[in-house]
Image (cartoon, rainbow, N blue to C red):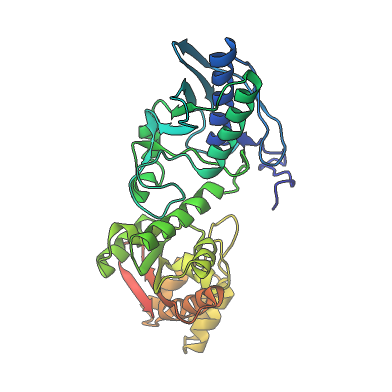
Amino acid sequence: MNETTPQTGEKGQPLRRGWTTGACATAATKSALMALLGGEFTDPVTITLPGGQTPAFALTHEAIGENWAEAGIVKDAGDDPDVTHGATIVARVALGPNGSGISFHAGNGVGTVTKPGLPIGVGEAAINPVPRKMMVTVVEEICREFGVAPDISVTICVPNGEKIAQKTWNPRLGILGGISILGTTGIVIPYSCSAWIHSIHSGVDVARATGLKHIVGATGDTSERAARTHLGLPNEAFVDMGDFVGGLLKYVRQNPVDRITISGGFAKLSKLAQGALDLHSARSTVDLDILADMLEEMGATKSLVASARGANTANEVQELAQDASLPLADLVATAARKRAGAVLKNPDIKIDILVVDRAGEIIAEAG
């Protein structure tokens, strides 16, 4: 689905799009700088996004002092379940020394990068490149308008941002103290899961930058704990890929490591074995007939095969196989490993599959 395709909810109504933290920070920066140099906040304030859209933002906070001004905007993520929805993004601009240029700083609630591998250097505010570029553009335009040099300090803060960040990948990625200011288009597309994919990419980048050659993609907490116990790898090796196994594999194909382990439940990995690269229940389902066929090939009784075809869930089929001492999970692991290899397209990357049951026990391993 592309950006021009309207998305709909359960009742067929179009889902409302929202704005990224980067777009909000840019708009707040623009209004604050207009107040600092021109004496009056722009409200609402309009910015131009990378795609040419020109949204307007209402201010919820204004403050001005000697050589500084700040403006705040409440982030509206539309109908997307974004953890930063409703957060206030505040930009404080201040005049810097002659020749200092435009600088960015992490205020309260915005993280600081502490590990290599991210697009922002260690020690820098966690404000990603596209939002920085957007803010540089508006600062330079306004400074030209008022005939002053663009020697401006920009500090972004997010009240309560440190608490919000605990619901994100930032602590694991080594971004400490708050959230990141993100966005490549400025637009939040509902349920596009772009933030999750971005976090997967960042997780791989951090692992590679810290010298790790083996990474683990887990579908959830239970499968990750099982893999941690089994493999004993450092924290940076584990990527919470969720349902996006395809997103992880395709990124590793472009940014290779020596070894990748995929750890997940029987049902999720059955989907991968059957060719699905998005394992969410709303976007892929297990074909129970395929599992029944596997059992038949293993010599299962006709009664067991029939029960498998009529089962309610994949886990029910696995329980039937387990009761009959048939290693169905092993076949699923092998098929999932083959499918992952077809996505990676790189025989030099070793692939392991761990199938984990609901109790957190590894019931099958391939590779």
Q: Does residue 339 appear to the left or right of 115 in the view shown?
A: right
Q: Does residue 242 appear to the left or right of 57 in the view shown?
A: left
- How many numbered tags mark residues here? 0
In this view of the protein, can residue 302 be seen by the observer? no
- The C terminus - image quarter: bottom left
The residue lying at 50 percent from left, 71 percent from top is 270
**Residue 277: quadrant of the picture:** bottom right
**Residue 76: quadrant of the picture:** top right
The residue lying at 43 percent from left, 58 percent from top is 205
Residue 10, position in %: x, y? 66, 43
Q: Nearer the viewer, residue 119 or 243?
A: 119
Note whether 354 is above or below 85 in the view shown: below
Residue 192, position in %: x, y? 60, 48
The residue lying at 74 percent from left, 47 percent from top is 5
**Residue 29: quadrant of the picture:** top right
Q: Which of 59 and 102 is in front in this view?
A: 102
Q: Nearer the viewer, residue 161 or 37?
A: 37
Residue 124, position in %: x, y? 39, 41
Q: Does residue 47 appear to the left or right of 314 in the view shown?
A: right
